[in-house]
Image (cartoon, rainbow, N blue to C red):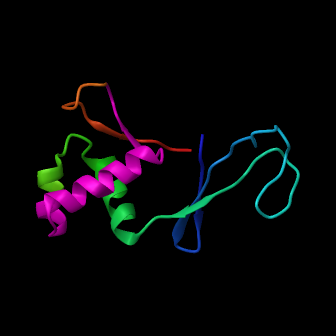
Amino acid sequence: MPKIENVDGGVKVTFMRKNANNSQTTPNGNSNGDISVEIQLTDRQQDIIAYLRVDGDTTATKLAKLFGMSKRTIDRELSFLRKNGFIEKETKDNRSPWVVIDR
């Protein structure tokens, strides 16, 4: 599970995983068993998450109109946020509401 923190007006995301040989190293040389990877969300990604907190039933088309960009761009942003554990659908049904994952 990613660890999400607010840092200097942005968001810092740390993903944890074991090395293949179960050694306990991190990119910064610590030996705590985890490898951390930071993901800095863009302002647009943060805005999308904020909107989904208010209206999880929204669609990519509605978000595209709201943010003044193409539906394809919104689809890419939603896909990124979903793949990186920030949002998910409430059920496997694609018509279900978006849920923002708080950590």
Q: Is residue 81 magenta?
A: yes
19 magenta-colored = no
Q: Position of residue 15 (x, y in %)?
A: 63, 49
Q: Position of residue 91 (x, y in %)?
A: 31, 25
Residue located at (36% from left, 54% from top): 49
Question: Horizontally, is 25 left or right of 35 in the view?
Answer: right
The secondary structure that dominates the magenta segment is helix
Q: Nearer the viewer, residue 22 or 81?
A: 22
Name the quadrant of the N terminus.
Answer: top right
Count of numbered marks = 0
Is 46 displayed left or right of 29 in the figure?
left
Q: Looking at the image, which residue is at 80% across and 64% down?
A: 28
Seen from the viewer's position, the closer of residues 9 and 71 is: 71
User: Along the line of sight, which residue is nearer the eye, 26 or 43?
Assistant: 26
Q: Is residue 42 left or right of residue 15?
A: left
Furthest toward the right, the residue is 31
Residue 103 location, x and y as percent? 56, 44
User: Which residue is farthest top?
Assistant: 92
Where is 102 relative to 8, above or below?
A: above
**What x and y, as percent, mark residue 74?**
23, 58
What residue is drawn where x is 47% and y is 48%?
A: 84
Note whether 99 is above or below 65 in the view shown.
Answer: above
In the image, taking residue 8 as reference, residue 100 lies left or right, namely left
Q: Out of 90 and 85, give the one closest to the viewer.
A: 85
Q: Residue furthest bottom?
A: 8
Compared to 90, does 80 lie above or below? Answer: below
Image-quadrant location for residue 17: top right
Question: Which contiguous range is marked in magenta?
Answer: 64-91
